[in-house]
Image: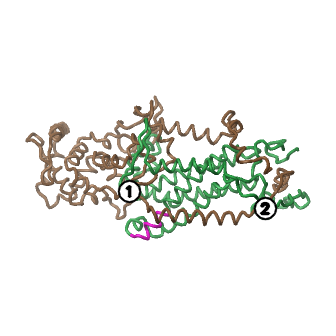
């Protein structure tokens, strides 16, 4: 597998066969997820009834801890954070790309922690290390596949409607920061690929003026960013993204008859 | 502030609800993705083409190595004349008119190519080598004009050089001590000693590979290795991977710009592409607020397959 791949050259496009197959696979997977019928849901459940009296008011006293606790409970009530019901219109395979990305991220973190524990040389010299690195590599591929398909899906669902623009923006931020995390990971491999990416990418980084602070040729800096700061950033943004999804709920279908009176209010008229 | 549960209940008012198990969904996703990833890992492993070394370079292509070392001494190599953040040159500074962010932080790394790549490592091993010590003293004692005359003549001669038994042969000429310097550097490189010397610092520990990577990058040997793996920028290299593996496909648009005018011929292509991608990424983030971009999903009815009205 370490011999150079077969490349497809068409017009000005040059792409390796594995990358081409991956991209074609993503298009097919997305089309299948859109077109295939999702298994029919179980029985309908009673919708929750608005109960204003059950909502604890924010205390007016000077206890910051109590005020924070109540405010958090009001913003993210338990049955909203961990819901056991959802709208019946949430019935498509497209919805699974988001949770797929989170699952892949979990495997990235697990395999990454093992790689960090044994050090950056381990995976080059042991079969166990190579396996863990392979899990890390394919988890990253799966993560980006799910991330991109999730983005496609949410775009065609216009999921930023009804006060969800910030959720969309945080999602784009996850994509950008994840690219940075992957980039520093490629720089941390300690092989020909890492060397070339470092030498070749320095010109782009330097052209922005960041080269004095972000030295892609400095292995220690790139490794530290990859195993600590950037994963923390990705995981934090994913947490914010999920909390925003739970806060707003799943957006209604584009042609849904209910209309929103005020984008951010959550109030509707039939 | 309104209670959020109340908001969501109102948002879902009139919408049929079905039971849902978020935790079960997450666990199933973790198990399924774990199986997929493990199968790929066991079946296909992962890419790991061994790193290039100075030793490998000097052994495989001694003429290129000596030619590069000579250009480092002459100050004509890409690194020596790069500009910020490595040197005071300007050959690799990218700008759009007066807009040149590359200059803003100045020459922060202060790379002296002749010293870092050639004279410094040679000086380290010269104590027990009178011939080498004399050559260094002669070179450093000469005027800049004399040094450049030797280096220029030697560079011209290297164009027709041949490699014989691990050394580089050129036609006789007025090269001063330069052939002694480069021959010793080549010897150090072929033994593997130079790989370590280029990392030497006053500190014991080392994690910064700026010097050896810049030196490798100045020659053609390293670029040839990358070209064989389709990693060059002109080969869509940013989204390619060594070996028979998928690369960073998510960089397809970033890579695309380098293949088309005006980027593919621009001397400031990196800066232009980064600004372009920065603008496009900003537009992507602001899609919810941009007419037409936010309306496209209504015009392309993919959503009618995702949300089938009999599910509402």
Q: Position of residue B210 (x, y in %)?
A: 36, 52
> Can see residue B182?
yes
Q: Quadrant of residue A83?
A: bottom right
**Which subunit holds the residue at mark 2?**
A
Does the magenta-highlighted stretch encompass residue A130? yes
Q: Nearer the viewer, residue A12 or A206?
A: A12
Q: Position of residue B241 (x, y in %)?
A: 42, 51
Q: Position of residue A38 (x, y in %)?
A: 70, 55
Using the image, tell me which numbered label, if any, was put on residue B208.
1
Using the image, tell me which numbered label, if any, was put on residue B99.
none
Question: Which residue is rendered at x = 22% and y = 56% of the image?
Answer: B189
Indicate the chain coloured green by its letter: A
Q: Position of residue B76 (x, y in %)?
A: 27, 39
Taking the view exactly as shown, the residue that stands out farthest to the left is B172
Do the CB atoms of the residues marked 1 and 2 lie less than 8 Å apart?
no
Residues in magenta, as a range = A126-135
**Which subunit holds the residue at mark 1?**
B
> Can see residue A194?
no
Q: Nearer the viewer, residue A73 or A195?
A: A195
* Residue A230 horizontal side relative to residue A261, left or right: left
Predominant secondary structure, magenta span: helix
Gap in Å between the C-alphas at discs 1 and 2? Answer: 58 Å
* Residue B54 horizontal side relative to residue A66, left or right: left
Question: Which residue is rendered at x = 34% and y = 46% of the image?
Answer: B227
Q: Nearer the viewer, residue B169 or B184?
A: B169
Using the image, tell me which numbered label, if any, was put on residue A42.
2
Q: Quadrant of residue B87?
A: top left
């Amino acid at each position: 597998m370490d011999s150079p791949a077969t490349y497809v050259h068409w017009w000005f496009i040059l792409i390796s066969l594995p990358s081409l197959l991956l991209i074609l696979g993503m298009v097919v997977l997305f089309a299948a997820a859109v077109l295939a019928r999702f298994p029919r849901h179980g029985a309908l459940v009673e919708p929750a009834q608005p109960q204003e009296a059950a909502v604890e008011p924010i205390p007016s006293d000077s206890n910051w801890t109590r005020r924070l606790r109540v405010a958090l409970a009001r913003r993210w009530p338990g049955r909203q954070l961990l819901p056991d019901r959802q709208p019946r219109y949430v019935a498509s395979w497209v919805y699974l790309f988001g949770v797929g990305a989170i699952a892949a991220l979990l495997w990235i973190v697990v395999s990454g922690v093992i790689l960090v524990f044994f050090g950056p040389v381990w995976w080059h010299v042991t079969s166990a290390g190579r396996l863990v690195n392979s899990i890390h590599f394919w988890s990253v591929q799966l993560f980006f596949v799910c991330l991109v398909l999730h983005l496609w899906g949410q775009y065609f669902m216009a999921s930023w409607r009804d006060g969800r623009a910030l959720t969309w923006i945080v999602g784009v931020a996850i994509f950008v920061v994840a690219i940075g995390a992957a980039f520093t990971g490629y720089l941390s491999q300690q092989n020909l690929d890492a060397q070339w990416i470092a030498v070749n990418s320095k010109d782009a980084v330097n052209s922005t003026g960041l080269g004095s602070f972000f030295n892609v040729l400095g292995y220690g800096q790139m490794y530290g960013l990859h195993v600590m700061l950037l994963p923390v950033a990705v995981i934090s943004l994913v947490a914010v993204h999920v909390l925003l999804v739970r806060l707003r709920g799943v957006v209604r279908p584009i042609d849904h008859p209910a209309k929103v009176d005020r984008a951010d209010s959550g109030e509707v008229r039939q | 502030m309104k209670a959020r549960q109340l908001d969501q209940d109102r948002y879902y008012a009139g919408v049929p609800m079905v039971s849902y198990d978020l935790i079960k969904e997450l666990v199933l996703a973790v198990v399924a993705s774990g199986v997929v990833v493990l199968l790929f890992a066991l079946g296909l492993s992962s890419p790991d083409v061994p790193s290039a070394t100075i030793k490998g370079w000097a052994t495989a292509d001694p003429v290129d190595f000596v030619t590069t070392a000579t250009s480092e001494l002459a100050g004509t190599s890409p690194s020596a004349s790069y500009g910020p953040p490595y040197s005071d040159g300007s050959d690799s500074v990218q700008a759009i008119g007066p807009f040149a962010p590359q200059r803003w932080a100045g020459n922060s790394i202060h790379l002296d190519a002749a010293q870092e790549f050639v004279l410094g490592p040679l000086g380290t091993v010269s104590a027990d080598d009178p011939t080498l010590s004399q050559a260094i003293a002669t070179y450093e004692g000469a005027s800049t004009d004399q040094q450049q005359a030797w280096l220029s003549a030697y560079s011209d001669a290297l164009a027709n050089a041949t490699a014989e038994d691990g050394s580089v042969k050129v036609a006789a000429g007025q090269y001063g001590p330069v052939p002694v310097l480069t021959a010793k550097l080549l010897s150090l490189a072929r033994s593997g000693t130079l790989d370590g010397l280029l990392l030497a610092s006053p500190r014991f520990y080392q994690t910064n590979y700026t010097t050896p990577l810049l030196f490798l990058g100045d020659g053609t040997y390293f670029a040839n290795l990358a070209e064989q793996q389709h990693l060059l920028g002109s080969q869509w290299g940013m989204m390619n991977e060594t070996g028979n593996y998928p690369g960073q496909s998510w960089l397809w648009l970033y890579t695309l710009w380098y293949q088309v005018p005006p980027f593919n011929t621009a001397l400031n292509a990196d800066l232009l592409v980064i600004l372009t991608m920065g603008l496009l990424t900003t537009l992507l983030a602001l899609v919810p607020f941009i007419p037409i971009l936010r309306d496209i999903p209504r015009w392309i009815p993919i959503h009618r397959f995702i949300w089938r009205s009999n599910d509402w």
